[in-house]
Amino acid sequence: MKKLLVILFISLILAGCSDEKKAQRLIKQYLKENLNDPSSYQPVSFGELEVYSTKYGQLINMKHKYRAKNAMGAIILEENTFEFDDAFTKVYRMK
């Protein structure tokens, strides 16, 4: 019984990690497609994956802090919240 609980616990931890990695990959892909100068992108930190239930379904988001060049060419520090679909196939909004 203990072995089953340990295996279940480890499986839950690994499943959570994979969603966070998917979210991070989607954020990087979104920024590379939408930044003024994608080659200037430097990740600083990723927040935790947050899941909220609403009357319309689940809201899944993650905060990300990064450096990149703005339209004037200056490197700035940004922090945005990225929202994902339930299946982690795309970023549908950045705030």
Image: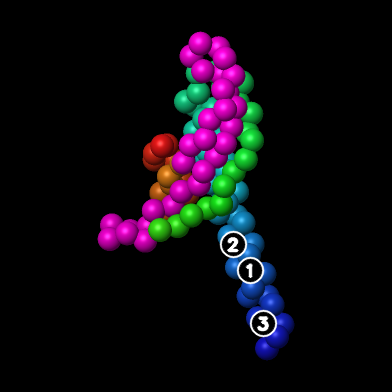
Three-letter code for the amino acid on which mark 2 is drawn: Ala
Counting other residues with Cα less than 10 Å from the Cα at mark 3, is it few (<14), some (14-19), or many (20 or more)?
few
**Applied colour scheme:** rainbow
Residue 2 higher or lower than 59, as above or below: below
| Residue at numbered disc 3 | 4
Contact between labelled residues 1 and 2, with CB atoms less than 8 Å apart: yes
**Residue under the point 65% across and 81% down:** 5
From the viewer's perspective, is 26 left or right of 8? Answer: left
What's the distance in space between the residues labelled 3 and 2, CA to CA?
A: 16 Å
Residue 61 higher or lower than 6, as above or below: above
Q: Is residue 75 magenta?
A: yes
**Residue under the point 46% across and 48% down:** 61
Q: Position of residue 8 (x, y in %)?
A: 63, 75
**Residue under the point 63% across and 33% down:** 43
Which residue is situated farthest in the right direction here? 3
Residue range highlighted in magenta: 53-81
Q: Secondary structure at mark 2?
A: helix
Answer with the quarter of the image where residue 28 lies.
Answer: top right
Q: Quadrant of the C terminus?
A: top left
Main secondary-structure element of the magenta-colored stretch: strand
| Residue at numbered disc 1 | 11
Three-letter code for the amino acid on which mark 3 is drawn: Leu
Residue 39 higher or lower than 26, as above or below: above
What's the distance in space between the residues labelled 2 and 1, CA to CA?
A: 6 Å
